[in-house]
Amino acid sequence: MTASTTTPIELDDAFLQDPHAAYRLLRQERPVTRAVTGMGLNVWVVTRYADVRAALNDQRLSKKGRRFGEVLHRHSVAPERLVQFADVFSEHMLNSDPPDHTRLRKIVNRAFTVRAIARMRERIEEIATGLADDIAARLEAGEREIDLLDSFAFPLPMTVICELLGVPEGRREDFRRWSNTLLSQGEPEPRAAASQEMGAFLSDLVERKRASPGEDMLSAIVQGTESSVSGTSIGTESSVSGTSIGTEDADRLSTTEAVSMAFLLLVAGHETTVNLIGNGMRALLTHPDQMDRLREDLDLAPKAVEEFLRYDGPVNLATLRFTAEPVTIGGVDIGEGEIVMIALDSADRDPERYPDPDTLDLTRDTSNHVAFGYGIHHCLGAPLARLEGEVAFRTLVGRFPRMSLAAEPEDLTWRESTLIRGLLRLPVRPA
């Protein structure tokens, strides 16, 4: 296959509702292919596991945010649909290459180690139990159907990340709305409005953390920004959930970087886990044999989390990259300045890597799946998402062992996003 003979596929709503059907064909016939997104971007899509893993670790595929405006407009067939995130969102880890990426990631890395996250288990279990208690109370009051996303999958990780960062409880639903809108392929006006509203909220939050810091991670980060009022850093160290962020790290952030960091941690800190829980429960409810396995042995939950990530991961196509120089991927030559999208969900169902990949098997070997990426941009919050997922499935299956879908599986609707693989609703009957 050569680039000149490739007719672009459309990453439209039909694709988003069932990407796995398209990926099966693409892996066989067009593993590296041209495509057009719902926002009118001409891109390349990489679908095979071996190519995906190599591309994720290829530094010729740049994520340097400051060049993206030029690249996006050059490859857009509908410039009017493009909406750039607010400028204050431009300088986070996923929009940077080394050495900036290395510096930014180092600042929060210690807060997300496996050991640091393990110390959060008790609080996560407390939140999950409280949400399950609320569901049980609604059942006792006569309700028979609930939306599991609204009632459990969203509030669990959102509460955790907001407590970690010190975000006021009253604005969390706003943040969910902004995040859903920004990550969609919908109309540009709502996305532009969400970007501006979220930017104003986070800029104000950073200023308030600087003026009146708490014991949270965001306070520790912003107290060391270059434009802080005192011009000093946060001191020897600042405690954040049993971890520390040292002065030598925090004082390297600009104010824009602090706001961008807050944006990334809040969005990534809940979106991945919301959809891990939602997609995983959907998988269980449509595979009763696997539900029985987990119900009979809740200690299987950590392994089940890895299979849910592989089977229907919460990130479909990874965040955009562009070629800093000509590259060859899967035998296809791609020129400099082209946009490349890496299909994580396709790679994790590649039969060359995982036998019988369309079968849900909670006991399979899922090692080296790429649901959290690979290489320097591997998801920083993966240990937190895994722990939240484990607690969620233990809690839901343990408390509501007879839970069933309250809709036909084919009637469930997926979000209009190339990045996020997640449902709009998950109606269930808990008992």
Image: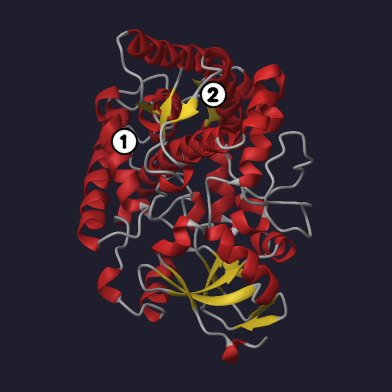
Q: Position of residue 343 (x, y in %)?
A: 59, 60
Q: On screen, 70 above or below 226?
A: below
Look at label 2 and name its amino acid.
Ala
Depth order, front residue of 20/371? 20
Q: Is residue 415 left or right of residue 312?
A: left
At x 56%, y 36%, the residue is 280
Q: On screen, 147 above or below 130?
A: below
Depth order, front residue of 427/201? 427
Look at label 1 and name its amino acid.
Val
Q: Position of residue 123 (x, y in %)?
A: 50, 14
At x 71%, y 60%, the residue is 49
Q: Is residue 342 visible?
A: no
Q: Position of residue 145 (x, y in %)?
A: 36, 24
Residue on which disc 1 sits: 206
Q: Is residue 386 left or right of residue 192?
A: right
- So how many labels did they put on this image? 2
Mark 2 packing: few (<14 Cα in 10 Å), some, or many (20+)? many
- Badge 2 element: helix
Residue on which disc 2 sits: 392
Q: Is residue 428 visible?
A: yes
For marks 1 and 2 on the same chain, the one whose residue lies earlier in the sequence: 1
Q: Position of residue 289 (x, y in %)?
A: 67, 31
At x 42%, y 53%, the residue is 91
Mark 1 packing: few (<14 Cα in 10 Å), some, or many (20+)? many
